[in-house]
Image (cartoon, grey):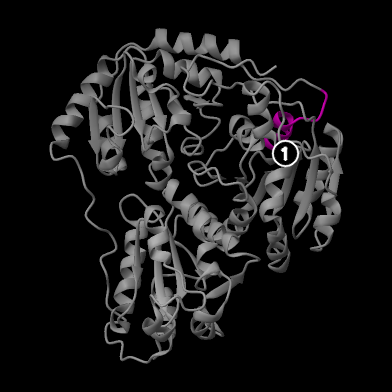
Amino acid sequence: MTGAQAIVECLRKQGVDTVFGYPGGTILPLYDALYGSPVRHVLTVHEQGAAHAADGYARASGRVGVCIATSGPGATNLVTGLAAAFMDSVPVVAITGQVQTNLIGRDAFQEIDITGITMPITKHNFLVKDIGKLPETLRRAFNIAQSGRPGPVLVDIPRDIQTNKHDFTDLDAEYPRQLLVRQSPDLAALLAKAAAAISAAERPVIIAGGGCISANAGPALIRFSEECRLPVVTTLMGIGAMPGNHPNLLGMTGLHGLKLANHAVHAADVLIVTGSRFNDRVTGDRARYADGKIIIHIDIDPAEVHKNVDAAVPLVGEMNNILNELTQTVQPGDLSGWWETITDWQALYNATTDSQNLSAPWVMSELNRQLTGKEVIYVTDVGQHQMWAAQHLVVNSPRCFLTSGGLGAMGFGLPAALGAQLSRPDKRVVHIVGDGALKMTGCELYTVSAEGLSIISIVVNNNSLGMVRQLQHCFFNKRYSASLLPAPMDFTAFASAFGIPATVTNSQEEFSQAFAAAWERQGPSMIIANIATDDLVSPMIAPGGAMDAYVDVK
């Protein structure tokens, strides 16, 4: 068979049912092999959309997402999406076409060194020059993407490797599904040290990061928290690792974290950090963050240990095993005083949305009210709306809050939402986006409409690049350079161009009615929530400040 036919067979044997892509000259042999195959191809409007869609597919399902692009601009258009997946440890395999092997290095039409370009933003990448190694390379790519700490892998395949025929005797060969998971060589002793520190703690806090979700460690986390009576906060990427309505969950911590969560972290004497890399948006001033605390860092990637914050007890290994071992060995002391303090903070910092005006926090509260008990995945873009969603949405299941955390890629939301919806047809996807971010990849509404996906897009419209404007408001003397959008966009006309009904809402009552109607409707829909330009995300930690150093956002 041809190399292209072998690629399709390899995809099938990896359990791939859907791929996202955009055709072009050097990848056409693969597209010809996809024609009539059982692998579903979703044509996006742009290759960046294909990469984000594969990312959303993977985040929502836990399986590897696959995107395809041609050489040159097609391949380079994947870069932002691959970087977003890399920063958030998402398993994606990107397959790119390349010029013929005898033209590589000769500046041929649409030749680009995509393996060189993506080396810093992929877990691994390959340039296939031997057709006989094609199946093994693809199997390795999928294995690397999903084993250990997940991440994107790119496979660059020259056109002649796709068109040439070969006797693929190893097409049915198996490749080990999991690479050996590294763990601390003295893990048993370190676990005993960690258990002793937690048992002696007076103010312990668990920080749940995105690694909890990648490791499917939510049940182990809940059991550990409940049996040891430990409060839990999440990072942005850890939202959903523990049910949002769980009494032990204090909310999100970090730059725009809830005051309750941030105060608990600031006051803690022991932090049990699970699957978080201590991003600067989580820690603020790292020296003050760790001051006076015993840091227990649980992660599958040894490169993350001590990278940003020194850990007194580094626990490198499989998270479920580590959490289960700690649950069995920790003997917590009397934490009633700590919980009384937390309860007092809860009363003091309880967030309310009493305003009668339509605002983003109120929108999130209304979504909580209308969607209680319903199967839903929230996908956000990047900006103020993202932080309001993270602060106020109640997310009770893992893989149900998808957002670009590490890269913060505006334009992530809509294509990621369509990928999520295709991977989880049993759940309804609610896409939350700002008016600025929608303009970046909004044409993927064409793909949503063409695929007939019942995605509800909520546009938080404040006629500005909201987060940029907020930073200018707080730190640049209210000089709103290039952040105001003076020409209001007619989002209803934009949506109607793709055959999608849209409703403009200016009040709480209008939004409630519009969302209820959208939920009952089959197919995609859009709701524009017009909010005040002056609305700012609060609380806000000063960049580089301590966890209790809040910026006055008035």
Locate the C terminus by quadrant. top right
The prevailing secondary structure element of the residues shown in magenta is helix
Locate the N terminus by quadrant. bottom left
Q: Is residue 366 visible?
A: yes
Q: Is residue 234 visible?
A: no
Q: Amino acid at mark 1?
A: Gln
For the record, the magenta segment spans 356-368
For residue 121, side relative to residue 176 (left or right): right
Residue 367 painted magenta: yes
Q: For the image shown, how many numbered marks are present on the structure?
A: 1
Q: Secondary structure at mark 1?
A: helix
**Residue at the image position 68 percent from the left and 65 percent from the top:** 447
Does residue 305 lie above or below 125 as drawn? above
Quarter holding residue 95: bottom left
**Residue at the image position 45 percent from the left and 24 percent from the top:** 284
- x, y percent for residue 256: 56, 26
Quarter holding residue 156: bottom left
Does residue 186 lie above or below 409 as drawn? above
For residue 10, side relative to residue 444 (left or right): left
Residue placed most toward the observer, 47 or 205: 47
Residue placed most toward the observer, 472 or 320: 472
**Residue at the image position 37 percent from the left and 92 percent from the top:** 165
Q: Residue furthest toward the front?
A: 106
- x, y percent for residue 32: 53, 86
Can you identify the residue that label 1 sits on?
370
Does residue 417 lie above or below 292 as drawn? below
- x, y percent for residue 83: 47, 52
- x, y percent for residue 501: 83, 56
